[in-house]
């Protein structure tokens, strides 16, 4: 039986045990990383993100001390945010982002050894060297930056390990990976806070805007009422009669615009503005069309109504729906030149609108407006569709989606001297949406537009 070299067996066993220890350590490390990423990936709280990051690094690398410097938004300084581990409680200096030392950290692809930086020659200013020296005197030996999209969001400085060992290649890679993940998470937290702040500011602005519009519009009502009474009490003849008629039409138009603005404001602040009743919808549409008879005559516009639904009765708020139809008709008549054409078609659809209907008009974001609960579409039997087609100037395709926002007008409306404040479609959209309906638009610039109002019949 051959002799066995016990030294070889012992050596192999030791190597195997060392390999097992390393694999076990790597396993524990990745479990810790998984827990870290799981926690910081579900929060936008900066304090939580930074504290979890530092505790994980200290625990996995066995550091004496670590400190985190954060760069606040719109700031050129990196200031100490949090520090854990052994060390003095002395005040640690802040760093300007244009310091040579900080420039070495930009990108976050390497660890800077403080001692090597202090020994290096070159364009290092006294202020820069003094700040780094102060870090070294506080027991810190290394630094690494946290960058996202080439933007430095923070810096970590840390000491040697408690056992005095240096960092392995795996540990260096581990540190850099955690730094990159943390940089992304911190940047997202900043963006989230910025969105929350902007939303709050927008809500405050929206509230003040509505209050201003409401107050101003109500103030206009009184002088308009007085002016209207005065004009209607005057009897004029000849040229004066023509001028008087023009003045009366102008007052009526101004009253209409004021009422439209007030209605738009009311829809924003009143949750119960819909008062449904069963009405004959084609009669409602015809009544709205009659409002434009004088303008259609003056512009010699060819006007057609095609009723494909007969005497159909549906439940809507008649005054509100009429206001929405008036707004869309007003847009069509205003967009058409003399001797142009406007067509109104009433049809029924058993299916909901889809992409073939065009681009849906939207006027608000649900989170920013106080609106009533909009009915669902599960119980819709069919849809009454009111289409308004014109051969006017049309709307640029890239502007259709936003044309329903308050005070928004198509860029080419200036070319045709189109009158109005740009609130009609916003008002129409909110009314139709409150009924559970939709407004769609198809348009080719220079060739005309088609607006379709989809009202559910339940």
Image: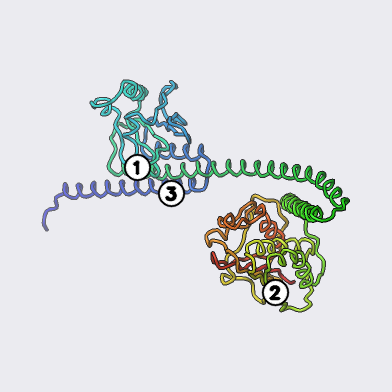
- The quarter of the image holding the N terminus is bottom left
Rendering quarter of residue 175: top left
How far apart in space, not on screen, are marks 3 and 1 (Cα)? 15 Å
Which residue position holds label 2?
304
Instruction: Give the secondary structure at mark 3.
Output: helix
Residue 394 in the image, given as x and y percentages of width and height = 57, 64
Residue 205 in the image, given as x and y percentages of width and height = 65, 42
| Residue placed most toward the observer, 195 or 158 | 195
Which residue position holds label 1?
176
Which residue position holds label 3?
34
Instruction: Give the secondary structure at mark 2.
Output: strand
| Residue placed most toward the observer, 190 or 427 | 427
At x 68%, y 63%, the residue is 328
Q: Compared to 304, does 230 lie above or below?
A: above
Left or right of residue 104, residue 15 in this image: left
- The quarter of the image holding the C terminus is bottom right
């Amino acid at each position: 039986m051959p002799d066995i070299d016990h030294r070889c067996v012992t050596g192999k066993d030791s190597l195997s045990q060392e390999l097992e220890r390393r694999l076990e350590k790597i396993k524990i490390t990745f479990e810790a990383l998984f827990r870290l990423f799981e926690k910081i990936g579900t929060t936008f709280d900066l304090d939580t993100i930074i504290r979890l990051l530092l505790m994980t690094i200290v625990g996995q690398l066995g550091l004496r001390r670590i400190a985190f410097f954060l760069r606040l938004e719109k700031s050129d300084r990196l200031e100490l945010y949090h520090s854990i581990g052994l060390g003095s409680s002395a005040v640690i200096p802040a760093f300007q982002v244009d310091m040579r030392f900080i420039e070495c950290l930009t990108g976050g692809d390497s660890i800077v050894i403080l001692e090597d930086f202090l020994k290096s020659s070159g364009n290092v200013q006294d202020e820069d060297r003094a700040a780094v020296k102060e870090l070294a005197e506080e027991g810190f030996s290394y630094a690494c930056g946290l960058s996202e999209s080439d933007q430095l969001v923070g810096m970590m400085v840390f000491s040697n390990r408690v056992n005095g060992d240096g960092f392995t290649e795996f540990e260096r890679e581990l540190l850099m990976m955690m730094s990159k993940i943390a940089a992304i998470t911190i940047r997202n937290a900043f963006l989230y806070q910025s969105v929350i702040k902007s939303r709050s500011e927008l809500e405050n602005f929206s509230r003040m805007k509505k209050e201003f519009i409401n107050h101003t519009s109500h103030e206009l009502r009184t002088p308009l009422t007085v002016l209207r009474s005065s004009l209607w009490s005057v009897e004029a003849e000849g040229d004066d009669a023509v001028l008087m008629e023009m003045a009366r039409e102008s007052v009526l138009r101004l009253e209409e615009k004021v009422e439209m603005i007030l209605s738009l404001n009311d829809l924003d602040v009143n949750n119960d503005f819909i008062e449904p009743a069963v009405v004959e919808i084609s009669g409602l549409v015809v009544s709205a069309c009659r409002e434009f008879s004088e303008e259609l005559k003056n512009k010699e516009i060819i006007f057609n109504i095609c009723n494909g639904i007969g005497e159909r009765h549906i439940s809507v708020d008649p005054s509100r729906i009429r206001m929405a139809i008036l707004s869309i008709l007003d847009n069509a008549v205003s967009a058409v030149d003399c001797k142009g054409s406007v067509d109104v078609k009433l049809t029924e659809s058993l299916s909901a609108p889809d992409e073939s209907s065009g681009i849906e008009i939207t006027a608000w974001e649900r989170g920013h407006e106080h609106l009533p609960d909009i009915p669902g579409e599960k119980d819709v039997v069919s849809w009454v569709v009111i289409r308004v087609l014109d051969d006017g100037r049309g709307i640029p395709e890239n502007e259709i989606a936003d044309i329903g926002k308050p005070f928004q007008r198509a860029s080419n409306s200036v070319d045709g001297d189109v009158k109005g404040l740009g609130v009609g479609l916003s008002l129409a959209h909110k009314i139709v949406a409150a009924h559970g309906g939709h407004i769609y638009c198809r348009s080719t610039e220079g060739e005309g537009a088609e607006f379709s109002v989809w009202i559910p019949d339940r």
